[in-house]
Amino acid sequence: MIAAPKDEYEMEQMLRLGLSYPHLFAIRFPRGSVSRVYPDFCGPLQQFKIGQAEVIREGSDATLLALGSMVESALQVHDLLKIQGTNVRVVNMRFAKPLDSQIIFESLSKNRFLFTLEEHVATGGFGSKVLEFLEQQKISDVSVHRFALPDQFVEQGNRDILFDHLGLSPEKMAAKILSQIRSKDPLFTPVS
């Protein structure tokens, strides 16, 4: 099991799940600390099971599958795109392993654009797991873009500055998402 909390509440729940799980259970969290609890952003606090994701925002133009600390960035991307007239679904995946296949299928029934957001290396990461899942399910008519760290040494520094440099700031991800949607779908009409 590989889990990644979006906030303090999920961290506590994942620790409880991990302590009661009979096999290996890894929890990934960013350098520093886990974000505060934000029910005002994400709705009421709720218990969850291993492998259970949650939809935080609904949208019909694309789906953002966010893991751990990138949920907060995904919410910022959602707000930036909404200003541009684009409505994206934000999913807090919570687990890189196992994936919540039901929520992925549900997302694909709404649109054919998936964007994965993770604070890990792209090679063999969460986005790779999503691609493997789609291949196993023989789903090929979907556009997938992974936002992740490059497979190279990243200098020490301020997280926001580094993420902006690596194209992982909310502003740069929003611009890339808008560009991808428009280039893959010439008839794209944003939802107002």
Image (spheres, grey):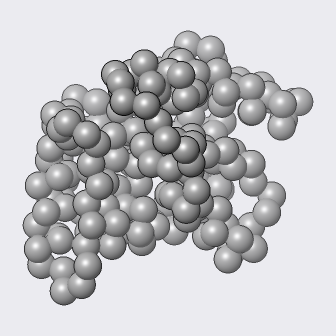
Q: Position of residue 51 (x, y in %)?
A: 36, 68
Q: State whether residue 23 is above or below residue 189.
A: below
Q: Position of residue 7 (x, y in %)?
A: 21, 42
- Residue at 29%, 37% (x, y): give it: 42
Residue 127 visible in the shown view: yes
Give the left or right position of residue 143, taking residue 57 as reference.
right
Q: State whether residue 25 is above or below residue 95.
A: below
- Residue at 26%, 79% (x, y): give it: 24
Q: Position of residue 18 (x, y in %)?
A: 17, 71
Residue nearer the viewer, 146 or 17: 146
Q: Quadrant of residue 133?
A: bottom right
Q: Quadrant of residue 95?
A: bottom left
Residue nearer the viewer, 133 or 81: 133
- Residue at 17%, 70% (x, y): give it: 17
Residue nearer the viewer, 145 or 52: 145
Q: Residue furthest right?
A: 186
Residue 192 visible in the shown view: no
Q: Position of residue 192 (x, y in %)?
A: 63, 19
- Residue at 38%, 39% (x, y): give it: 71
Give the left or right position of residue 33, taking residue 128 as reference.
left
Give the left or right position of residue 38, taking residue 150 as reference.
left
Q: Residue furthest top?
A: 83
Numbered-mark total: 0
Give the left or right position of residue 117, taking residue 189 as reference.
left
In the rendered image, the quadrant that contains the N terminus is bottom left
